[in-house]
Amino acid sequence: MALETAYIQEKLSQKFGNNVLNFEMKRDIFTLEATPNAIHDVIRFLKEEEDLNFHFLTDLTGIHFPDNDETHQFAVVYQMHNWVENVRLRVKTFLPENPETVTITDLFLCANWMEREAWDFFGINFIGHPQLKRILNMDEMVSHPMRKEFPMEDSGRTDKDDRFFGRTPVNN
Amino acid sequence: MSDLLLPPEHRYAKVIEQTRNEDGSEFSILNLGPTHPATHGIFQNILLMDGERILDAEPTIGYIHRAFEKIAENRPFYQINVLTDRMNYCSSPINNMAWWMTVEKLLNIEVPKRAQYLRVIVMELARITDHLICNSILGVDTGAYTGFLYVFQFREKVYEIYEEICGARLTTNMGRIGGFEREWSEEAFKKLDVFLTDFPVAWKEFENLFERNRIFIDRTVNVGGITAESAMQYGLTGPNLRAAGIDYDVRKAAPYSSYEDFEFDVPVGKSGDTYDRFCVRNAEVWESLSIIKQALAKLPEGPIHADVPDYYLPPKEDVYHNMESLIYHFKIVMGEVPVPVDEIYHAVEGGNGELGFYLTTDGSRTPYRLKLRRPCFIYYQAYTEMIKGGMLSDAIVILSSLNVIAGELDA
């Protein structure tokens, strides 16, 4: 029997009540939202409950929403996959400014670098992570470059004089 | 950079100070990489060694990080394709096609059957070159240079086919939204036929050179093994996962681009060691060849791209003589085409695992956020676990058998 989305929703709602919300079918992937307090338990439940069995963490990523309200500034998106039933699931949790959430490295070993990447690029602090430090950027970097306010290129650079590239200083 | 200099407070420095072997000898630190001919890419591992044996390893990555995800947020969809080439550059057509399929999924574009089949052919060609390089380099690292030189000429043959299709060789930038940019030339099909006749002979000989070779078996069996359970925990996908005994293949699990029309097996290994990974890749090359033959036999006639003037640039000569073409050309280049607000995750079976694009749009011409699920970024974490307790020379062999591509690792 295939794993029905209605069944997943019912199971989760029964267990977590108001902590799981906004169930929605986004194209081919069932998407839901969990509150930051419950996210670790939700992921654990999805993984360990026998008839849900989302045993594979496909991806973990951060997204920055500067235009959202204060409690929805950042999102952490978990993409999970049940290989036996071949069902994918997307779990999101929204975080405020100075984002902090609980690590899931105790559930999935592969979350280690994914969380380090999210810390590196978005500054999302995963509490309990064994070694939360930068991964792709250099250690001396102070900003988190995938945030929307981070500019693409430093306009104050003097080594890239626009005149040498046939452009005016204002780049028109 | 503190890790490079290994200051006294580094955890390895402490271990060395506190631990002595019975004969009084002490542990040592070895910097493997970042630039070393045997690592085939820019990988650094700081190894804690007891003589020749590895006790612990600390990988450092990011040496060729180029911020693709950030650049992608400032580019229209059709310009992001050139970024995907530069991820897994051993099989760039797979990345290209995966990206176009993601965009087509977002825009609800139905691609004509002929274009789908041609995509399958070119993706399987790319998979062959990917596995060919990985396996022959594994031979080089175990001391067998001949096999590498022998099959490497066939990568050149595949690159000539790419050249006929799109004009480029390594970073192909192949295809467009909705299909291909032009019909494949006669020459391309001729070269493909020659390749399909000559390559299996050479590949059979390559297999014979290695598969029952005593030295090769001694170097690879029970080296860098991983259980199915921990392979899943570490997020392994692709041939590395299948070598551990799990038959997860995106082409079977979620068929894209008409993969459901072809018959092929998913080869699996047993112990997940270097030898099994080698054999799984060998077997996959045969499956790929069979898929290409099936696709060529069943190749339907028809258009080479979908009829989507909003996204597919009109022929250049029409732009100057045809009003509609001029309008669409202007709209595409100036970014006036409609894009829905949506979230898409599309995955394909890349050369070394599940390559996924998680695309979030806000209705503008650029992605709001594009997350690249690069398979080797995720499974490279298992490397430390695999080399612990082994010899230094095994670490080199394991690294090449994992098919970690620096461009994809760091994106």
Image (spheres, rainbow, N blue to C red):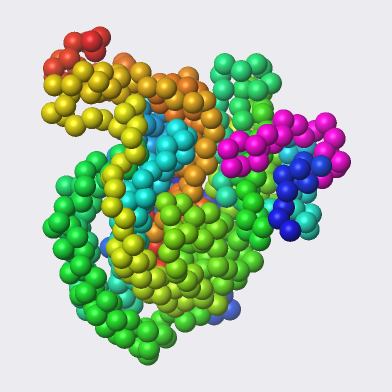
Q: Is residue B357 above or below residue B207?
A: above
The quadrant the C terminus of chain B occupies is: top left
The answer to whether residue B108 of the structure is visible from this angle is yes
The one nearer the camera, B1 or A131, is: A131
Q: Could you say where residue B136 lies in the image, as x and y percent from the top left?
A: 30, 72
The one nearer the camera, B202 or A40, is: B202
Q: Which region is colored magenta?
A: A11-33
Q: Residue at x 29, y 48 (%)?
A: B302
Q: Is residue B180 above or below residue A165?
A: below
Numbered label tally: 0
Residue A114 in which image quadrant: top right
Residue B110 in which image quadrant: top left
Residue B273 is one of the magenta-drawn residues: no
Q: Residue at x 46, y 52 (%)?
A: B256
The quadrant the N terminus of chain B occupies is: top left
Q: Could you say where residue A93 lies in the image, as x and y percent from the top left?
A: 68, 33
Q: Could you say where residue B186 lies in the image, as x and y percent from the top left?
A: 15, 56
Q: Residue at x 33, y 35 (%)?
A: B307
Residue A32 is one of the magenta-drawn residues: yes
